[in-house]
Amino acid sequence: MALNQRKVAMVGCGSAGAASCFALMQSGLFNEMVLIDAAPEKAEGEAMDLAQGLTFAKPMKIYAGSYDDLADAGIIIVAAAAVQRRGDTRLELVEKNVALFKQIIPEIAKRNEEGIMLIVANPVDILTYAALKISGWAEGRIFGLGTVLDSARLRSLLSEKLSVDARNIHAYMVGEQGRGEVPIWSSATVSGVPIREFCEMRGYPDPTEYFEQIAKEVRGSADMITRKKKAAYYGVAMAVRRVCESIVRDEKSVLPVSSLMYGAFDIDGLALSMPAIVGKDGVECLVPLEMSEEELDELRKTAATVKAIVDDVFGEAR
């Protein structure tokens, strides 16, 4: 079946999935959207709620469906995840989500192997690896949301501090999305000016302490939001929209998505969040990123953390 490049499917209609559907509905990128959830009534309710607002958006078809409706979807977004119970260890949560993916991903792969699969569920780097291994799809066609939102948070906070448009700031959080992610200050710039030089220009001659503070704030943003309002999803939704824009429009934007690494920075066989060119065929290639020895060491440490969990879940032979 020929793919409809303007059809998007959402698998998992929890808060992040539903908010992403709302953002995509308003984007004008798609003419068809199907919602799928383990609780069909949840998908039906979300689809109905969205569809009733179409008078205020671009014309499109929005409906709840089944895995069979994925056959011609150009982009399939997987936001389904197991519920974390109080007392669950990180490894237990990973094992639950991998078990869930072992149910979901084969159902997708049976019906569609030519589309793009975007993993949103967390822990995104490990689940991206799981989706790659379970599906058998071409590697560039499956990738995770990675640190797209985290890098946006970094730029937003820098924008406030330096009183400059966030869109002119180029800075990345990389590695394992979450507590282990690493800010790369060595290659950060504001309109081509190295970040430390720009800080000095704006009255901050030694921003080291501030850099440490801002990195801590970025890493803890999701937890802080969750404590205050139970879940973080608006930022996720906007990040999903941004990635979909790059795919549908074949923008070939550089985005820090989670994809499989093959030897860069001496990291092999793991999915990590690194800047990559993203277009209509998915991830085209990683973009070289200049790092200091200290940053490289931190990246390798976070990679080792991911590898330990992947080995526990999948076995060292993999």
Image: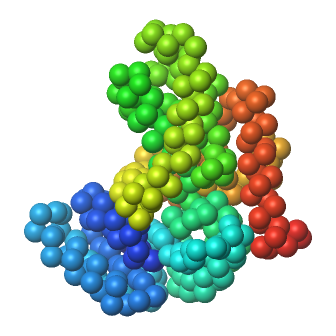
Looking at the image, which residue is at 30% across and 73% down? 32
Give the image location of residue 86, x and y in percent. 58, 74
Q: Quadrant of residue 19?
A: bottom left
Is residue 101 visible to the viewer in this orientation of the structure? no
For image coordinates 54% across by 25% down, the residue present is 210
- The quadrant of the picture occupied by the C terminus is bottom right
Would you say 72 lies left or right of 263 here? left
Q: Whole-percent x and y of residue 306?
A: 74, 58
- Percent across and percent down for residue 263 are 80, 47
Relative to 211, is 19 above or below? below
Asked whether 59 or 172 is in front, the reply is 172
Residue 161 visible in image: yes
Q: Residue at x 47, y 52 (%)?
A: 224
| 235 up-or-down from 6: above or below | above
Q: Is residue 300 above or below residue 28?
A: above
Q: Quadrant of residue 44?
A: bottom left
